[in-house]
Image (spheres, rainbow, N blue to C red):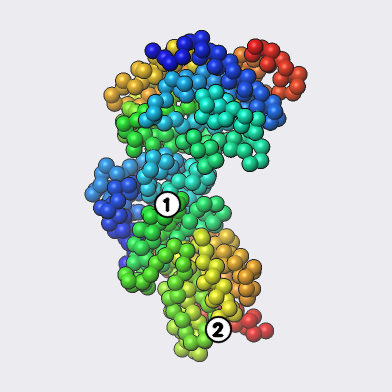
Amino acid sequence: MKSIRDGFGEALVELGEKNKNIIVLTADLADSTRVKDFADKFPDRFYQVGVAEQGLVTIAAGIAEAGKIPFTTSYAVFSPGRTWEQIKVTAALNNVPVKIVGAHAGFGASMYGATHESLEDIALMRVMPNMVIVSPCDYEEAKKATIAVANNGKPSYLRLARQNSPVLTKPRDDFEIGKANVLYEGKDPQVAIIGCGPILAEALSAAEYLKNIGIETMVINNHTIKPIDDIAITNAARICGAIVTVEEHQIAGGLGSAVAEVLSQSYPVPIEFVGVRDSFGESAKTYDELWKKFGLKKENIIEAVKKVIVRKNS
Amino acid sequence: MTKLSLNELQETAKRVRRDIIGLIYKAGSGHPGGSLSSTEILVALYFEIIGPDDHFFLSNGHVCPALYSVMAEKGLIDKKLLSTYTELGSILQGHPERTRLKEIENTSGPLGLGLAQAAGYAAIKRDSYIYCETSDAEHDEGNHWEAVMFAAKYNLKNLIQIIDRNRIQIEGTVEEIMPLGNLIGRYKSFNWNVQEIDGHNFNEIFEAVEKAKKETENPTVIVANTVFGKDISFMEGNPDWHARAPNEEEYKKAMEELK
Protein backbone atom coordinates (compact mmCIF):
# COMPACT_ATOMS: atom_id res chain seq x y z
CA MET A 1 0.00 0.00 0.00
CA LYS A 2 1.39 3.34 -1.05
CA SER A 3 -0.17 6.66 -1.86
CA ILE A 4 -0.67 8.23 -5.25
CA ARG A 5 0.29 11.64 -3.86
CA ASP A 6 3.64 10.24 -2.70
CA GLY A 7 4.30 8.97 -6.21
CA PHE A 8 3.60 12.48 -7.48
CA GLY A 9 5.89 14.13 -4.92
CA GLU A 10 8.78 11.76 -5.62
CA ALA A 11 8.47 12.11 -9.38
CA LEU A 12 8.47 15.87 -9.00
CA VAL A 13 11.83 15.80 -7.22
CA GLU A 14 13.19 13.52 -9.95
CA LEU A 15 11.90 15.91 -12.60
CA GLY A 16 13.32 18.89 -10.74
CA GLU A 17 16.79 17.40 -10.87
CA LYS A 18 16.64 16.77 -14.61
CA ASN A 19 14.71 19.79 -15.80
CA LYS A 20 15.36 23.30 -14.54
CA ASN A 21 12.14 24.49 -16.14
CA ILE A 22 10.02 22.66 -13.60
CA ILE A 23 8.44 25.16 -11.20
CA VAL A 24 6.15 24.26 -8.32
CA LEU A 25 3.55 26.48 -6.68
CA THR A 26 1.26 25.74 -3.79
CA ALA A 27 -1.61 27.45 -2.01
CA ASP A 28 -0.59 26.69 1.58
CA LEU A 29 -0.68 22.93 1.01
CA ALA A 30 2.92 21.96 0.29
CA ASP A 31 3.01 19.14 2.78
CA SER A 32 -0.27 17.40 2.06
CA THR A 33 0.12 17.70 -1.70
CA ARG A 34 3.62 16.22 -1.23
CA VAL A 35 5.64 19.02 -2.80
CA LYS A 36 7.59 19.84 0.34
CA ASP A 37 10.60 17.77 -0.75
CA PHE A 38 10.72 19.69 -4.02
CA ALA A 39 10.41 22.97 -2.12
CA ASP A 40 13.27 22.04 0.22
CA LYS A 41 15.49 20.87 -2.60
CA PHE A 42 14.77 23.61 -5.13
CA PRO A 43 13.73 26.70 -3.12
CA ASP A 44 14.38 29.01 -6.09
CA ARG A 45 11.85 27.13 -8.17
CA PHE A 46 9.13 26.98 -5.56
CA TYR A 47 6.45 29.59 -4.89
CA GLN A 48 4.20 29.69 -1.86
CA VAL A 49 1.27 31.90 -2.90
CA GLY A 50 -0.78 31.66 0.29
CA VAL A 51 -4.36 30.43 0.54
CA ALA A 52 -5.04 31.93 -2.87
CA GLU A 53 -6.00 29.35 -5.47
CA GLN A 54 -7.06 31.88 -8.09
CA GLY A 55 -3.68 33.54 -7.77
CA LEU A 56 -2.05 30.11 -7.83
CA VAL A 57 -3.36 29.31 -11.29
CA THR A 58 -3.08 32.77 -12.84
CA ILE A 59 0.44 33.39 -11.57
CA ALA A 60 1.37 29.96 -12.93
CA ALA A 61 -0.06 30.98 -16.30
CA GLY A 62 2.38 33.89 -16.37
CA ILE A 63 5.19 31.53 -15.39
CA ALA A 64 4.21 29.21 -18.25
CA GLU A 65 4.10 32.15 -20.67
CA ALA A 66 7.67 32.84 -19.61
CA GLY A 67 8.65 29.37 -20.89
CA LYS A 68 8.52 27.32 -17.69
CA ILE A 69 6.47 24.27 -16.67
CA PRO A 70 4.54 25.21 -13.53
CA PHE A 71 2.84 22.58 -11.35
CA THR A 72 0.10 24.20 -9.25
CA THR A 73 -0.86 22.22 -6.18
CA SER A 74 -3.96 22.40 -4.03
CA TYR A 75 -6.91 20.19 -3.22
CA ALA A 76 -9.11 19.33 -6.18
CA VAL A 77 -12.12 21.00 -4.55
CA PHE A 78 -10.23 24.31 -4.64
CA SER A 79 -8.37 23.83 -7.90
CA PRO A 80 -9.86 23.10 -10.39
CA GLY A 81 -12.97 23.55 -8.19
CA ARG A 82 -12.65 27.25 -7.40
CA THR A 83 -10.33 28.10 -10.27
CA TRP A 84 -12.34 26.92 -13.27
CA GLU A 85 -12.61 30.29 -14.99
CA GLN A 86 -9.00 31.17 -14.28
CA ILE A 87 -7.98 27.86 -15.82
CA LYS A 88 -10.16 28.54 -18.84
CA VAL A 89 -8.88 32.02 -19.60
CA THR A 90 -5.25 31.95 -18.53
CA ALA A 91 -4.26 28.31 -19.06
CA ALA A 92 -6.55 26.60 -21.57
CA LEU A 93 -7.66 29.41 -23.91
CA ASN A 94 -4.23 30.98 -23.55
CA ASN A 95 -2.91 27.47 -24.30
CA VAL A 96 0.09 27.42 -21.98
CA PRO A 97 1.31 24.31 -20.15
CA VAL A 98 0.00 24.99 -16.66
CA LYS A 99 -0.30 21.75 -14.67
CA ILE A 100 -3.30 21.70 -12.36
CA VAL A 101 -2.68 19.17 -9.62
CA GLY A 102 -5.87 18.39 -7.69
CA ALA A 103 -5.06 16.46 -4.54
CA HIS A 104 -7.44 14.64 -2.19
CA ALA A 105 -9.72 13.96 -5.17
CA GLY A 106 -12.63 11.61 -4.59
CA PHE A 107 -13.43 10.69 -0.97
CA GLY A 108 -9.84 10.82 0.30
CA ALA A 109 -10.49 13.78 2.62
CA SER A 110 -13.36 11.83 4.20
CA MET A 111 -12.79 13.26 7.68
CA TYR A 112 -13.33 16.80 6.39
CA GLY A 113 -16.74 16.16 4.84
CA ALA A 114 -18.49 17.14 1.62
CA THR A 115 -16.78 20.54 1.28
CA HIS A 116 -13.41 18.83 0.86
CA GLU A 117 -14.47 15.81 -1.20
CA SER A 118 -14.01 16.37 -4.91
CA LEU A 119 -16.52 14.39 -6.95
CA GLU A 120 -16.99 16.91 -9.76
CA ASP A 121 -13.47 17.79 -10.91
CA ILE A 122 -13.28 15.42 -13.89
CA ALA A 123 -16.52 16.88 -15.23
CA LEU A 124 -15.20 20.41 -14.78
CA MET A 125 -12.05 19.68 -16.71
CA ARG A 126 -13.65 17.44 -19.34
CA VAL A 127 -15.56 20.34 -20.83
CA MET A 128 -12.39 22.41 -21.16
CA PRO A 129 -10.89 22.57 -24.67
CA ASN A 130 -7.10 22.03 -24.81
CA MET A 131 -7.10 20.33 -21.39
CA VAL A 132 -5.53 16.91 -20.78
CA ILE A 133 -6.88 14.90 -17.81
CA VAL A 134 -4.93 12.09 -16.16
CA SER A 135 -6.10 10.13 -13.12
CA PRO A 136 -3.40 7.64 -12.07
CA CYS A 137 -4.49 4.44 -10.33
CA ASP A 138 -1.56 3.91 -7.98
CA TYR A 139 1.80 5.10 -6.67
CA GLU A 140 3.81 3.77 -9.62
CA GLU A 141 1.48 5.15 -12.22
CA ALA A 142 1.36 8.52 -10.42
CA LYS A 143 5.12 8.80 -10.93
CA LYS A 144 4.86 8.05 -14.63
CA ALA A 145 1.84 10.29 -15.07
CA THR A 146 3.63 13.19 -13.39
CA ILE A 147 6.60 12.87 -15.74
CA ALA A 148 4.39 12.43 -18.80
CA VAL A 149 2.28 15.45 -17.91
CA ALA A 150 5.40 17.56 -17.32
CA ASN A 151 6.61 16.76 -20.81
CA ASN A 152 3.39 17.00 -22.83
CA GLY A 153 3.53 20.76 -23.45
CA LYS A 154 -0.17 21.20 -22.72
CA PRO A 155 -2.46 22.52 -20.00
CA SER A 156 -3.13 19.40 -17.95
CA TYR A 157 -5.07 18.23 -14.94
CA LEU A 158 -3.52 15.57 -12.73
CA ARG A 159 -6.01 14.01 -10.32
CA LEU A 160 -4.49 12.64 -7.11
CA ALA A 161 -5.96 10.54 -4.31
CA ARG A 162 -4.92 11.06 -0.71
CA GLN A 163 -5.07 7.60 0.83
CA ASN A 164 -2.65 4.69 0.72
CA SER A 165 -3.87 2.26 -1.90
CA PRO A 166 -2.78 -1.03 -3.49
CA VAL A 167 -0.02 -0.77 -6.10
CA LEU A 168 -1.62 -2.32 -9.18
CA THR A 169 1.04 -1.57 -11.78
CA LYS A 170 4.76 -2.24 -12.04
CA PRO A 171 7.58 0.22 -12.68
CA ARG A 172 8.23 -1.44 -16.06
CA ASP A 173 4.63 -1.21 -17.28
CA ASP A 174 4.04 1.09 -20.24
CA PHE A 175 2.39 4.40 -19.62
CA GLU A 176 1.38 6.76 -22.36
CA ILE A 177 -1.07 9.66 -22.08
CA GLY A 178 -4.19 8.78 -24.05
CA LYS A 179 -3.49 5.03 -24.16
CA ALA A 180 -5.58 2.87 -21.84
CA ASN A 181 -3.95 -0.21 -20.29
CA VAL A 182 -5.49 -3.62 -19.75
CA LEU A 183 -5.00 -4.63 -16.10
CA TYR A 184 -6.66 -8.00 -16.39
CA GLU A 185 -8.18 -10.02 -19.21
CA GLY A 186 -10.06 -13.27 -18.64
CA LYS A 187 -10.65 -15.86 -21.37
CA ASP A 188 -13.50 -14.72 -23.67
CA PRO A 189 -14.58 -11.92 -21.36
CA GLN A 190 -18.29 -11.10 -21.24
CA VAL A 191 -17.94 -7.62 -19.74
CA ALA A 192 -15.27 -4.93 -19.83
CA ILE A 193 -14.87 -2.99 -16.59
CA ILE A 194 -13.39 0.40 -17.41
CA GLY A 195 -12.20 2.63 -14.59
CA CYS A 196 -9.65 5.14 -13.39
CA GLY A 197 -7.94 5.92 -10.10
CA PRO A 198 -7.41 3.76 -7.00
CA ILE A 199 -10.94 2.36 -7.22
CA LEU A 200 -9.53 0.03 -9.91
CA ALA A 201 -8.38 -2.17 -7.01
CA GLU A 202 -12.08 -2.81 -6.30
CA ALA A 203 -12.60 -3.60 -9.98
CA LEU A 204 -9.80 -6.18 -9.90
CA SER A 205 -11.25 -7.80 -6.76
CA ALA A 206 -14.63 -7.90 -8.45
CA ALA A 207 -13.09 -9.49 -11.55
CA GLU A 208 -11.43 -12.17 -9.43
CA TYR A 209 -14.67 -12.96 -7.62
CA LEU A 210 -16.59 -13.09 -10.90
CA LYS A 211 -14.02 -15.40 -12.49
CA ASN A 212 -14.50 -17.80 -9.57
CA ILE A 213 -18.24 -17.95 -10.24
CA GLY A 214 -17.69 -18.44 -13.96
CA ILE A 215 -18.05 -14.90 -15.28
CA GLU A 216 -15.00 -13.75 -17.22
CA THR A 217 -14.28 -10.03 -17.51
CA MET A 218 -11.55 -7.65 -18.55
CA VAL A 219 -10.44 -4.66 -16.50
CA ILE A 220 -9.20 -1.57 -18.30
CA ASN A 221 -7.25 1.19 -16.61
CA ASN A 222 -8.42 4.27 -18.47
CA HIS A 223 -6.00 6.66 -16.75
CA THR A 224 -6.39 9.38 -19.38
CA ILE A 225 -9.91 10.76 -19.45
CA LYS A 226 -9.04 13.41 -22.04
CA PRO A 227 -8.04 12.75 -24.75
CA ILE A 228 -9.92 9.48 -24.28
CA ASP A 229 -8.67 6.27 -25.86
CA ASP A 230 -11.68 5.68 -28.10
CA ILE A 231 -9.92 2.82 -29.92
CA ALA A 232 -9.32 0.80 -26.75
CA ILE A 233 -12.84 1.49 -25.50
CA THR A 234 -14.44 0.53 -28.80
CA ASN A 235 -12.36 -2.63 -28.98
CA ALA A 236 -13.41 -3.58 -25.46
CA ALA A 237 -17.06 -3.13 -26.46
CA ARG A 238 -16.51 -5.29 -29.57
CA ILE A 239 -14.80 -8.03 -27.58
CA CYS A 240 -17.18 -8.07 -24.60
CA GLY A 241 -20.47 -6.58 -25.81
CA ALA A 242 -21.11 -4.98 -22.43
CA ILE A 243 -19.38 -2.34 -20.29
CA VAL A 244 -19.28 -1.33 -16.64
CA THR A 245 -17.58 1.95 -15.80
CA VAL A 246 -16.13 2.59 -12.35
CA GLU A 247 -15.08 5.93 -10.89
CA GLU A 248 -14.78 7.85 -7.63
CA HIS A 249 -16.69 10.79 -9.09
CA GLN A 250 -20.19 11.85 -10.05
CA ILE A 251 -21.54 9.64 -12.82
CA ALA A 252 -22.66 12.83 -14.56
CA GLY A 253 -19.79 14.21 -16.59
CA GLY A 254 -17.15 11.76 -15.44
CA LEU A 255 -15.30 8.83 -16.97
CA GLY A 256 -18.52 6.84 -17.49
CA SER A 257 -20.03 9.71 -19.44
CA ALA A 258 -16.90 9.91 -21.57
CA VAL A 259 -17.05 6.17 -22.31
CA ALA A 260 -20.76 6.41 -23.15
CA GLU A 261 -20.09 9.31 -25.53
CA VAL A 262 -17.55 7.19 -27.38
CA LEU A 263 -19.59 4.00 -27.55
CA SER A 264 -22.91 5.61 -28.45
CA GLN A 265 -21.22 6.72 -31.66
CA SER A 266 -18.78 3.90 -32.37
CA TYR A 267 -20.22 0.64 -31.03
CA PRO A 268 -23.33 0.91 -28.83
CA VAL A 269 -23.53 -1.81 -26.16
CA PRO A 270 -25.25 -1.88 -22.74
CA ILE A 271 -23.37 0.13 -20.10
CA GLU A 272 -23.78 0.22 -16.33
CA PHE A 273 -22.22 3.04 -14.32
CA VAL A 274 -20.62 2.66 -10.91
CA GLY A 275 -20.04 6.10 -9.39
CA VAL A 276 -21.68 8.74 -7.25
CA ARG A 277 -25.30 9.38 -8.16
CA ASP A 278 -25.99 13.09 -7.99
CA SER A 279 -25.22 13.54 -4.33
CA PHE A 280 -22.64 15.24 -2.14
CA GLY A 281 -20.35 13.30 0.15
CA GLU A 282 -20.18 13.55 3.94
CA SER A 283 -17.81 12.97 6.82
CA ALA A 284 -16.52 9.55 7.75
CA LYS A 285 -13.44 8.21 9.52
CA THR A 286 -12.20 6.56 6.32
CA TYR A 287 -12.80 6.85 2.61
CA ASP A 288 -13.75 3.18 2.61
CA GLU A 289 -16.87 3.82 4.68
CA LEU A 290 -17.92 6.34 2.03
CA TRP A 291 -17.12 3.97 -0.83
CA LYS A 292 -19.55 1.56 0.86
CA LYS A 293 -22.21 4.18 1.51
CA PHE A 294 -22.04 5.62 -2.01
CA GLY A 295 -21.87 2.25 -3.78
CA LEU A 296 -18.30 2.16 -5.05
CA LYS A 297 -17.19 -1.20 -3.66
CA LYS A 298 -16.40 -4.55 -5.20
CA GLU A 299 -19.94 -5.71 -4.41
CA ASN A 300 -21.44 -2.83 -6.35
CA ILE A 301 -19.22 -3.60 -9.33
CA ILE A 302 -20.19 -7.28 -9.22
CA GLU A 303 -23.84 -6.32 -9.15
CA ALA A 304 -23.36 -3.95 -12.10
CA VAL A 305 -21.60 -6.67 -14.10
CA LYS A 306 -24.43 -9.13 -13.48
CA LYS A 307 -26.99 -6.51 -14.42
CA VAL A 308 -25.25 -5.56 -17.65
CA ILE A 309 -24.97 -9.22 -18.66
CA VAL A 310 -28.73 -9.61 -18.25
CA ARG A 311 -29.25 -6.54 -20.43
CA LYS A 312 -26.80 -7.80 -23.02
CA ASN A 313 -28.54 -11.18 -23.25
CA SER A 314 -32.09 -9.88 -23.23
CA MET B 1 14.76 61.59 -24.53
CA THR B 2 11.76 60.15 -26.27
CA LYS B 3 11.86 58.87 -29.84
CA LEU B 4 8.86 60.93 -30.87
CA SER B 5 8.25 64.56 -29.97
CA LEU B 6 5.45 65.39 -27.60
CA ASN B 7 3.49 66.77 -30.51
CA GLU B 8 3.97 63.56 -32.51
CA LEU B 9 2.84 61.48 -29.54
CA GLN B 10 -0.25 63.61 -29.11
CA GLU B 11 -1.05 63.35 -32.83
CA THR B 12 -0.58 59.58 -32.59
CA ALA B 13 -3.01 59.45 -29.67
CA LYS B 14 -5.52 61.41 -31.71
CA ARG B 15 -5.25 59.01 -34.66
CA VAL B 16 -5.63 56.09 -32.25
CA ARG B 17 -8.79 57.65 -30.82
CA ARG B 18 -10.21 58.04 -34.32
CA ASP B 19 -9.41 54.39 -35.05
CA ILE B 20 -11.03 53.32 -31.77
CA ILE B 21 -14.27 55.08 -32.63
CA GLY B 22 -14.06 53.91 -36.23
CA LEU B 23 -13.64 50.24 -35.45
CA ILE B 24 -16.26 50.22 -32.71
CA TYR B 25 -18.71 52.00 -35.02
CA LYS B 26 -18.02 49.56 -37.84
CA ALA B 27 -18.32 46.51 -35.57
CA GLY B 28 -21.41 47.84 -33.83
CA SER B 29 -19.91 46.84 -30.49
CA GLY B 30 -16.96 47.47 -28.22
CA HIS B 31 -15.88 49.45 -25.19
CA PRO B 32 -15.20 53.07 -26.08
CA GLY B 33 -15.04 54.61 -22.59
CA GLY B 34 -12.07 52.64 -21.27
CA SER B 35 -10.38 52.52 -24.68
CA LEU B 36 -10.33 56.32 -24.82
CA SER B 37 -9.11 56.65 -21.22
CA SER B 38 -6.27 54.15 -21.87
CA THR B 39 -5.06 55.73 -25.09
CA GLU B 40 -2.07 57.75 -23.86
CA ILE B 41 -0.95 54.93 -21.55
CA LEU B 42 -0.91 52.44 -24.43
CA VAL B 43 0.69 54.87 -26.89
CA ALA B 44 3.39 55.66 -24.32
CA LEU B 45 4.02 51.98 -23.68
CA TYR B 46 4.15 50.83 -27.29
CA PHE B 47 5.95 53.84 -28.78
CA GLU B 48 8.44 54.70 -26.04
CA ILE B 49 8.51 52.46 -23.01
CA ILE B 50 8.46 48.76 -23.90
CA GLY B 51 12.03 47.77 -24.76
CA PRO B 52 13.10 44.73 -26.80
CA ASP B 53 13.51 42.60 -23.67
CA ASP B 54 10.40 43.90 -21.94
CA HIS B 55 6.89 42.50 -21.93
CA PHE B 56 3.43 43.98 -21.61
CA PHE B 57 0.30 42.38 -20.19
CA LEU B 58 -3.05 44.04 -20.78
CA SER B 59 -5.32 42.95 -17.96
CA ASN B 60 -8.47 44.93 -18.77
CA GLY B 61 -8.76 43.32 -22.19
CA HIS B 62 -12.07 45.00 -23.02
CA VAL B 63 -10.07 48.09 -24.00
CA CYS B 64 -8.63 46.13 -26.92
CA PRO B 65 -9.97 48.63 -29.48
CA ALA B 66 -7.23 50.90 -28.05
CA LEU B 67 -4.68 48.06 -27.98
CA TYR B 68 -5.38 47.06 -31.58
CA SER B 69 -5.35 50.66 -32.80
CA VAL B 70 -2.04 51.36 -31.08
CA MET B 71 -0.52 48.15 -32.45
CA ALA B 72 -1.68 49.09 -35.94
CA GLU B 73 -0.32 52.62 -35.57
CA LYS B 74 3.00 51.13 -34.44
CA GLY B 75 3.02 48.77 -37.42
CA LEU B 76 2.79 45.57 -35.37
CA ILE B 77 -0.38 44.59 -37.20
CA ASP B 78 -1.75 45.67 -40.55
CA LYS B 79 -3.96 48.74 -40.19
CA LYS B 80 -6.45 47.18 -42.61
CA LEU B 81 -7.14 44.50 -40.00
CA LEU B 82 -8.80 47.03 -37.71
CA SER B 83 -11.99 46.92 -39.75
CA THR B 84 -12.23 43.16 -39.10
CA TYR B 85 -12.54 43.63 -35.31
CA THR B 86 -15.02 41.01 -33.94
CA GLU B 87 -15.67 39.55 -37.41
CA LEU B 88 -15.74 35.77 -37.76
CA GLY B 89 -12.20 34.55 -38.32
CA SER B 90 -10.51 37.84 -37.40
CA ILE B 91 -7.37 37.76 -35.26
CA LEU B 92 -8.84 40.83 -33.55
CA GLN B 93 -11.30 39.18 -31.21
CA GLY B 94 -13.81 40.99 -29.04
CA HIS B 95 -11.39 40.34 -26.22
CA PRO B 96 -7.73 39.76 -27.09
CA GLU B 97 -6.51 36.19 -27.54
CA ARG B 98 -2.85 35.34 -27.48
CA THR B 99 -3.23 32.21 -29.61
CA ARG B 100 -4.75 34.25 -32.46
CA LEU B 101 -2.84 37.49 -32.08
CA LYS B 102 0.74 36.31 -31.60
CA GLU B 103 2.12 39.77 -30.84
CA ILE B 104 0.49 39.93 -27.39
CA GLU B 105 1.53 38.15 -24.20
CA ASN B 106 -1.79 37.11 -22.73
CA THR B 107 -5.42 36.36 -23.37
CA SER B 108 -7.54 38.74 -21.32
CA GLY B 109 -10.92 40.27 -20.73
CA PRO B 110 -12.29 38.52 -17.66
CA LEU B 111 -11.08 40.94 -15.01
CA GLY B 112 -8.60 40.50 -12.21
CA LEU B 113 -6.35 37.98 -13.97
CA GLY B 114 -3.76 40.08 -15.78
CA LEU B 115 -1.64 41.29 -12.89
CA ALA B 116 -1.22 37.69 -11.69
CA GLN B 117 0.02 36.60 -15.11
CA ALA B 118 2.36 39.59 -15.29
CA ALA B 119 3.62 38.80 -11.79
CA GLY B 120 4.26 35.15 -12.66
CA TYR B 121 6.14 36.26 -15.75
CA ALA B 122 8.10 38.86 -13.78
CA ALA B 123 9.10 36.25 -11.20
CA ILE B 124 10.80 34.26 -13.96
CA LYS B 125 12.13 37.08 -16.17
CA ARG B 126 13.85 39.09 -13.49
CA ASP B 127 16.09 40.93 -15.96
CA SER B 128 13.20 42.31 -18.00
CA TYR B 129 10.68 44.98 -17.14
CA ILE B 130 7.17 43.60 -17.10
CA TYR B 131 4.42 46.15 -17.60
CA CYS B 132 0.77 45.57 -16.85
CA GLU B 133 -2.20 47.80 -17.46
CA THR B 134 -5.16 47.24 -15.18
CA SER B 135 -8.39 49.12 -14.59
CA ASP B 136 -9.53 50.58 -11.31
CA ALA B 137 -12.79 48.62 -11.47
CA GLU B 138 -10.97 45.30 -11.61
CA HIS B 139 -9.65 46.07 -8.16
CA ASP B 140 -13.00 44.64 -7.02
CA GLU B 141 -11.63 41.19 -7.92
CA GLY B 142 -10.04 39.07 -5.19
CA ASN B 143 -7.71 37.43 -7.69
CA HIS B 144 -6.08 40.81 -8.33
CA TRP B 145 -5.17 41.28 -4.68
CA GLU B 146 -3.73 37.77 -4.52
CA ALA B 147 -1.30 38.93 -7.19
CA VAL B 148 -0.61 42.20 -5.36
CA MET B 149 0.54 40.24 -2.30
CA PHE B 150 2.55 37.77 -4.38
CA ALA B 151 4.42 40.53 -6.22
CA ALA B 152 5.36 42.20 -2.96
CA LYS B 153 6.39 38.98 -1.22
CA TYR B 154 8.69 38.00 -4.07
CA ASN B 155 10.11 41.52 -4.47
CA LEU B 156 9.17 41.86 -8.12
CA LYS B 157 10.88 45.19 -8.59
CA ASN B 158 10.77 44.64 -12.34
CA LEU B 159 6.95 44.66 -12.32
CA ILE B 160 5.34 47.99 -13.19
CA GLN B 161 1.57 48.19 -13.03
CA ILE B 162 -0.27 51.14 -14.53
CA ILE B 163 -3.87 51.55 -13.38
CA ASP B 164 -6.22 53.29 -15.79
CA ARG B 165 -8.03 55.13 -13.01
CA ASN B 166 -11.03 56.35 -14.96
CA ARG B 167 -13.45 55.88 -12.05
CA ILE B 168 -16.21 54.36 -14.18
CA GLN B 169 -17.43 50.78 -14.51
CA ILE B 170 -20.33 49.05 -16.28
CA GLU B 171 -23.18 50.14 -14.08
CA GLY B 172 -21.98 53.41 -12.64
CA THR B 173 -19.04 55.10 -10.98
CA VAL B 174 -16.45 53.02 -9.18
CA GLU B 175 -17.33 54.93 -6.03
CA GLU B 176 -21.00 53.90 -6.29
CA ILE B 177 -20.55 50.31 -7.40
CA MET B 178 -17.80 49.33 -4.96
CA PRO B 179 -15.71 51.98 -3.25
CA LEU B 180 -12.01 51.13 -3.42
CA GLY B 181 -11.20 52.99 -0.20
CA ASN B 182 -7.73 54.40 0.02
CA LEU B 183 -6.35 52.74 -3.09
CA ILE B 184 -2.92 54.30 -2.75
CA GLY B 185 -2.78 53.45 0.93
CA ARG B 186 -3.77 49.88 0.21
CA TYR B 187 -0.85 49.43 -2.18
CA LYS B 188 1.53 51.13 0.24
CA SER B 189 0.45 48.78 3.00
CA PHE B 190 1.57 45.86 0.79
CA ASN B 191 4.98 47.51 0.26
CA TRP B 192 4.39 48.56 -3.32
CA ASN B 193 5.96 51.77 -4.57
CA VAL B 194 3.11 54.06 -5.51
CA GLN B 195 3.02 57.03 -7.85
CA GLU B 196 0.03 59.06 -8.92
CA ILE B 197 -0.04 60.87 -12.25
CA ASP B 198 -2.24 62.37 -14.93
CA GLY B 199 -2.71 59.43 -17.28
CA HIS B 200 -3.15 61.65 -20.32
CA ASN B 201 0.12 63.49 -19.80
CA PHE B 202 2.94 61.75 -21.69
CA ASN B 203 5.72 63.40 -19.72
CA GLU B 204 4.20 62.33 -16.43
CA ILE B 205 3.85 58.75 -17.72
CA PHE B 206 7.50 58.64 -18.85
CA GLU B 207 8.82 60.17 -15.63
CA ALA B 208 6.82 57.76 -13.51
CA VAL B 209 8.08 54.76 -15.46
CA GLU B 210 11.69 55.97 -15.30
CA LYS B 211 11.37 56.30 -11.55
CA ALA B 212 9.78 52.86 -11.28
CA LYS B 213 12.62 51.29 -13.25
CA LYS B 214 15.09 52.56 -10.66
CA GLU B 215 13.34 50.81 -7.78
CA THR B 216 15.61 48.29 -6.10
CA GLU B 217 13.27 46.18 -4.04
CA ASN B 218 9.54 46.37 -4.60
CA PRO B 219 7.03 46.45 -7.46
CA THR B 220 5.57 49.75 -8.57
CA VAL B 221 2.03 50.82 -9.24
CA ILE B 222 1.38 54.00 -11.18
CA VAL B 223 -2.13 55.27 -10.52
CA ALA B 224 -2.89 57.08 -13.76
CA ASN B 225 -5.87 59.37 -13.30
CA THR B 226 -7.76 59.43 -16.56
CA VAL B 227 -11.02 60.61 -18.06
CA PHE B 228 -13.43 57.91 -19.15
CA GLY B 229 -14.38 58.52 -22.80
CA LYS B 230 -11.63 61.17 -23.06
CA ASP B 231 -11.94 63.81 -25.80
CA ILE B 232 -15.49 62.99 -26.84
CA SER B 233 -17.72 65.40 -24.95
CA PHE B 234 -20.81 63.24 -24.75
CA MET B 235 -18.87 60.15 -23.65
CA GLU B 236 -16.67 61.71 -20.98
CA GLY B 237 -17.56 60.42 -17.53
CA ASN B 238 -20.74 58.72 -18.72
CA PRO B 239 -20.99 55.00 -17.79
CA ASP B 240 -23.45 54.45 -20.65
CA TRP B 241 -20.40 54.36 -22.90
CA HIS B 242 -18.71 51.45 -21.14
CA ALA B 243 -19.81 48.98 -23.81
CA ARG B 244 -21.81 50.70 -26.48
CA ALA B 245 -21.19 51.55 -30.12
CA PRO B 246 -22.11 54.99 -31.41
CA ASN B 247 -24.94 55.31 -33.94
CA GLU B 248 -24.29 57.17 -37.19
CA GLU B 249 -25.06 60.57 -35.76
CA GLU B 250 -22.96 59.98 -32.67
CA TYR B 251 -20.15 58.60 -34.79
CA LYS B 252 -20.07 61.72 -36.97
CA LYS B 253 -20.16 63.96 -33.94
CA ALA B 254 -17.35 62.02 -32.27
CA MET B 255 -15.15 62.14 -35.36
CA GLU B 256 -15.83 65.86 -35.67
CA GLU B 257 -14.57 66.33 -32.10
CA LEU B 258 -11.46 64.28 -32.86
CA LYS B 259 -10.40 66.39 -35.86
* Residue indicated by mark 2: A190
SS of the residue under disc 2: loop
Q: Is residue B154 above or below residue B2?
A: below
Residue B153 on image: x %, y %:
32, 33
- Please state, as top left, top right, bottom left or bottom right, where the N terminus of chain A lies in the image: bottom left
Residue B249 on image: x %, y %:
76, 18
Identify the subunit bearing mark 1: A
Q: Residue furthest left?
A: A41
Find the distance from the CA under tag 2 to the CA under tag 1.
39 Å
Identify the subunit bearing mark 2: A
Question: Which residue type carries mark 2?
Answer: Gln
- Please state, as top left, top right, bottom left or bottom right, where the C terminus of chain A lies in the image: bottom right
SS of the residue under disc 1: loop
Q: Is residue B257 above or below residue B27?
A: above
Q: For the residues carrying marks 2 and 1, which lies nearer the camera in this image?
A: 1
Q: Is residue B252 left or right of residue B71?
A: right
Question: Which residue type carries mark 1?
Answer: Gly
Residue visible at 52% across and 84% down?
A189
Q: Quadrant of residue B218?
A: top left
Residue visible at 31% across and 20% down?
B214
Q: Is residue A175 above or below residue A31?
A: below
Residue visible at 51% across and 12% down?
B8
In the drawing, what numbered circle is on residue B144? none
* Residue indicated by mark 1: A153
Q: Is residue B83 left or right of residue A136?
A: right
Residue B170 on image: x %, y %:
62, 28
Residue B137 on image: x %, y %:
54, 27
Residue visible at 51% across and 66% down?
A229
- Badge 2 and badge 1 both on one subunit: yes
Q: Is residue A124 left or right of residue A312?
A: left
Q: Is residue A230 above or below residue B34?
A: below
